[in-house]
Image (spheres, grey):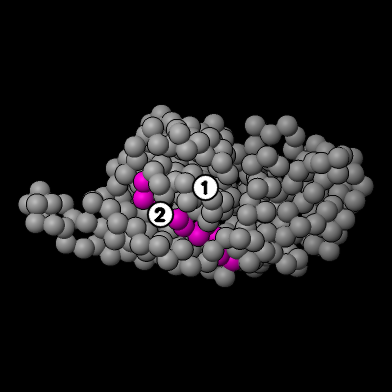
């Protein structure tokens, strides 16, 4: 997990929180005769992105962007770390065989250029120098991937902006409606089970130098926001960063959580499960009330904690299922 997730902690401090907007402009006379329209969008950096029409050949440099494209019915021609995406985000599986463009933090410019994309969708987690190089290849729609003040709003706005760039606004509207319906369904299921207001703590963890580090998903995280939307109480008291709402603690830092449900997501591609394996004989862990009561829930692999509506719908189903079983 450290390989895939630690990069987000470092990048989140630099993530922008600007909303994107878009307009559609009449095309030139010749283009109009062919039934096409120019599209002008403003991305998270304030840059104007002009397209001759809805983008069809799209490259995506981050997994949440890939998920958005797949959700909208757009098969990306290039994806960063295809193998990783397939392992960590199964809620919106790839339907094609996109070219692997390299890592999420360092895409191969030559590979991207070889695909001759209409559009490159990136996030502000990507280094500015890389974005500058990408802009020499094709129009780049740069998104702010997270905003601790309104994660659900940011998720929906990003999906809508990509939809305007790809001519799939109806699909975006439907995806956001399905997400809202799933939240309402989850909230009702928990209330019917007498679990409204139940405290929950979600985290991920990794092992370094034989020490387990824990990363809390506070109320400002996407998962923390969804937890509250379905009627749960986020138990974390630590402060999260302003973009992703992620905190930092260790096993001893869990002692103040009290009686609650603890949930996490791992992945079979990782070398270990720190909560089930590395802490199995750790007295600080085994003495915790929620561990003693067997209220530790490993949710299914493949739910991307920083994804879009599809991932969050899968998360609601998984968490509600775990709490009500």
Mark 2 / mark 1, whichever is N-terminal: 1
The secondary structure that dominates the magenta segment is loop
Looking at the image, the residue that sits furthest to the top is 97
Specify whether residue 312 is in view. no
Residue 193 in picture, x, y percent from top left:
60, 59
Side of 63 relative to 1 (left or right)? left
Specify whether residue 55 is in view. yes
Q: Nearer the viewer, residue 12 or 149?
A: 12
Reply yes or no: does residue 139 show up in magenta: yes
Side of 153 relative to 23 (left or right)? right
Reply yes or no: does residue 51 show up in magenta: no
Mark 1: give few (<14), some (14-19) or many (20+) Cα within 10 Å. some
Residue 149 in picture, x, y percent from top left:
57, 70
Q: Secondary structure at mark 2?
A: strand
Residue at 30% across, 57% down: 50
Residue at 64% across, 42% down: 4
- The image shows residue 279, relative to residue 180, as above or below, that is above
The image's mark for residue 130 is 1
Residue at 16% across, 52% down: 36
The image's mark for residue 245 is none
Residue at 49% across, 50% down: 131
C-alpha gap between disc 2 and disc 1: 13 Å
Q: Nearer the viewer, mark 2 or mark 1?
A: 1
| Snapshot quadrant of residue 24 | bottom left
Q: Nearer the viewer, residue 62 or 230?
A: 62
Write the start and end of the magenta stretch as one range. 138-148
| Residue on which disc 2 sits | 141
């Amino acid at each position: 997990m450290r390989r895939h997730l630690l990069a987000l902690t470092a990048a989140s401090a630099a993530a922008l929180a600007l909303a994107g907007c878009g307009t559609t402009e009449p095309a030139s006379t010749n283009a109009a005769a062919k039934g096409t329209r120019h599209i002008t969008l403003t991305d998270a950096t304030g840059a104007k992105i002009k397209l001759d029409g809805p983008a069809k050949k799209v490259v995506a440099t981050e997994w949440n962007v890939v998920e958005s494209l797949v959700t909208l019915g757009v098969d990306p021609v290039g994806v960063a770390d295809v193998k990783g995406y397939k392992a960590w985000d199964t809620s919106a599986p790839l339907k094609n065989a996109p070219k692997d463009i390299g890592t999420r933090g360092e895409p191969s410019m030559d590979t991207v250029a070889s695909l001759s994309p209409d559009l490159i969708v990136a996030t502000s987690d990507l280094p500015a120098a890389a974005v500058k190089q990408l802009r020499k290849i094709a129009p780049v729609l740069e998104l702010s991937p997270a905003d601790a003040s309104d994660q659900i709003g940011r998720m929906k706005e990003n999906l809508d902006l990509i939809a305007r760039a790809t001519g799939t606004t109806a699909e975006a509207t439907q995806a956001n409606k399905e997400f809202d319906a799933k939240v309402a369904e989850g909230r009702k299921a928990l209330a019917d089970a007498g679990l409204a207001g139940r405290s929950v703590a979600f985290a991920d963890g990794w092992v370094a130098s034989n020490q387990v580090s824990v990363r809390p998903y506070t109320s400002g995280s996407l998962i923390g926001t969804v937890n509250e939307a379905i009627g749960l109480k986020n138990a974390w008291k630590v402060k999260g960063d302003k973009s992703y709402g992620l905190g930092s603690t260790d096993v001893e830092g869990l002692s103040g959580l009290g009686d609650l449900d603890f949930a996490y997501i791992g992945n079979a591609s990782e070398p270990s499960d720190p909560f089930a394996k590395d802490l199995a004989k750790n007295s600080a862990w085994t003495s915790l009330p929620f561990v003693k009561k067997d209220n530790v829930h490993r949710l299914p692999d493949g739910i991307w904690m920083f994804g879009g509506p599809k991932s969050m719908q899968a998360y609601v189903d998984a968490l509600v299922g775990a709490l009500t079983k």
